[in-house]
Each structure stands twice: as C-alpha cells, then as structure tokens.
Image: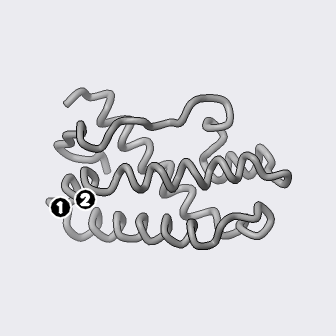
Amino acid sequence: MEKGKSQNITKFLLQSVLFYENIDDHVKLLDLDSEELSLFKNDIRIFLFVAERYQSFTRSFVLYNISTIQKRYEHLSTACINSKNYTNAMGAKLGILEAEKTEPAFSIPAETLSINRLAS
C-alpha cells in the first residue's frame, strides 16, 4: 500500500475523532440531524474500542467500515458548514476547516484499501 494513502486514512480517522469529541457543543446551534449524528458517533465509538483493545482487528474494521464513516462524516461536516450559524472558530475546533476550502479530505473506495497498521 502506498504510504500516502495510509497517511490519508489515518488523517481522516483522526479528523473524525476530533469532530466526534467536539460536536456536542454545537449540535443545536448548527441544527444537525440527531439520528445521523448518533449513527456517526456509534461508528467512532466502535472504532475507538477496536483500536484500543484489539489492534490486530483494526485493519479489518477500517476496511469494512471506512466508507460508512466517511459518508456520515462528509454529510455532517457539510451540514455544519452550510449552517447559517457556522463560524470558522467552530470549524477549527471540529477539525473541518479544511473541508470548507477543499474537496473532501478523504476519498478512497473501501474495497481498494490495504492497511498494514494505523499510526498511533
């Protein structure tokens, strides 16, 4: 696997965790879909659980779930950016400020991924 793709996956997962850790402060103000947010947060909780306790299964988990996490993250981060109450300060705290200026930070079909090990 190319080193750049592995780094992109790691960067995306870290960005998703940052969003997960900070979004609760902004849910009402940004009028986010609570069901979609709940599904995203469950995906991240499971990822964190697997990564912390079962490192040997992390690769399989990422291969199986990355596209779902990506779609939910992109939907939620786009909803944040499109909210009339969104600010750059929120974007920085949530880790989505880059998404405001560029294409999605991560876009690799899950079936083409091959990860030896995620960076800690």
Q: Residue at x 48, y 57 (%)?
A: 17
Q: Amino acid at mark 1?
A: Phe
Quadrant position of residue 106: top left
Q: Nearer the viewer, mark 1 or mark 2?
A: 2
- Horizontal and vertical percent for residue 18? 54, 56
- Horizontal and vertical percent for residue 8? 39, 36
- Marks 1 and 2, how far apart in space? 6 Å
Mark 2, other Cα within 10 Å: few <14 / some 14–19 / many ≥20:
some
Quadrant position of residue 97: top right
Q: Residue at x 80, y 48 (%)?
A: 87
Q: Residue at x 56, y 64 (%)?
A: 21
On screen, residue 85 above or below 33:
above
Q: Nearer the viewer, residue 22 or 65?
A: 65
Taking the image as shown, residue 46 lies to the left or right of residue 35, namely left
- Horizontal and vertical percent for residue 66? 35, 51
Q: Nearer the viewer, residue 10 or 77?
A: 77
The quarter of the rendered structure image containing the N terminus is top left
| Disc 1 target residue | 57
Helix, strand or loop status at disc 1: helix
Taking the image as shown, residue 38 lies to the left or right of residue 23, namely left
Helix, strand or loop status at disc 2: helix
| Disc 2 target residue | 61
Q: Amino acid at mark 2?
A: Phe
Question: How many numbered marks, from 0 up?
Answer: 2
Q: Residue at x 43, y 64 (%)?
A: 44
Whether the residues at callouts 1 and 2 have beta carbons within 8 Å, the answer is: yes
Q: Which mark is residue 32?
A: none
- Horizontal and vertical percent for residue 38? 54, 72
